[in-house]
Image (cartoon, rainbow, N blue to C red):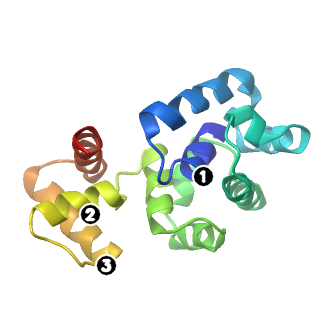
Amino acid sequence: MGSVICAASFQPRRKYESTIRPRIRQLQAAWPDAAAVRGFQTRLAMEDLAVAMNFNSPRRVATARGITDLLVTNGIDTRNDLHAWFDHEAGRTALLVVKGVGPKTVDYIGNLVGRSKIAVDVHLRAFAAEAGVSGLKYEQLQEGSEETAALLGHEPGGLEHAVWRFMSQSG
């Protein structure tokens, strides 16, 4: 769960493959007890996350701490707990209260724990713009993309990831 929290907190506007993925793997090796949220929270109390992630960003560390505290407060400790929590709109809404968490981050966290959603990011917006679709709000682009996935017989998260991979390699 520490890796889910860190991926969501540190990934925005960074190259995942070259910047975030190696740091997540390093964190998983160094903090094996952070597989559960409570273990991650304990590590956060004892060690410096910026050092563990080799990523000096007080704002992103604060977001990771905020997500962690919220999950602990709500009894969320495992991926299965978080997956089930997303069944309730209140869980998604609570995450949006954490500073640094927006709709894209909530959807991205959901994807990381097995929820298939379109997490609208700069790559998906650029892809849509190249197709002549621009100026849509997050929810509009997400809904249109999810309808497209359904028409094509794809999981929404799978289509979003395919677009993300294509755009991140071409841009």
Depth check, front residue: 88 or 38: 38
Q: Tell whether label 2 touches label 3 (CB within 8 Å).
A: no
Inter-mark Cα distance, 1 to 3: 22 Å
Q: Residues within 10 Å of mark 1 (few under 14, many from 20)?
A: many
Picture coordinates of residue 87 (x, y %)? 48, 62
Depth check, front residue: 126 or 1: 126
Inter-mark Cα distance, 3 to 2: 10 Å
The amino acid marked with disc number 3 is Lys
- What residue do we see at 62% from left, 71% from top? 94
- What residue do we see at 25% from left, 78% from top? 136
For marks 3 and 2, the one nearer the N-term is 2
Number of residue marks? 3
- What residue do we see at 43% from left, 33% from top? 17
47 displayed left or right of 115? right
Marker disc for residue 137: 3
Picture coordinates of residue 26 (x, y %)? 64, 24
Read off the residue under disc 2: 125
- What residue do we see at 33% from left, 75% from top? 139
Is residue 27 shown above or below 141? above
The answer, for residue 11, to whether it is visible in the render is yes
Is residue 71 shown above or below 32? below
Q: Quadrant of residue 45?
A: top right
Depth check, front residue: 59 or 159: 59
Picture coordinates of residue 1 (x, y %)? 63, 40
The amino acid marked with disc number 2 is Arg
Which quadrant is the C terminus positioned in? top left
Marker disc for residue 9: 1
Is residue 129 shown above or below 14? below
> Please, what secondary structure does the residue beneath circle 3 have?
loop
Q: Residues within 10 Å of mark 2 (few under 14, many from 20)?
A: many
141 displayed left or right of 86? left
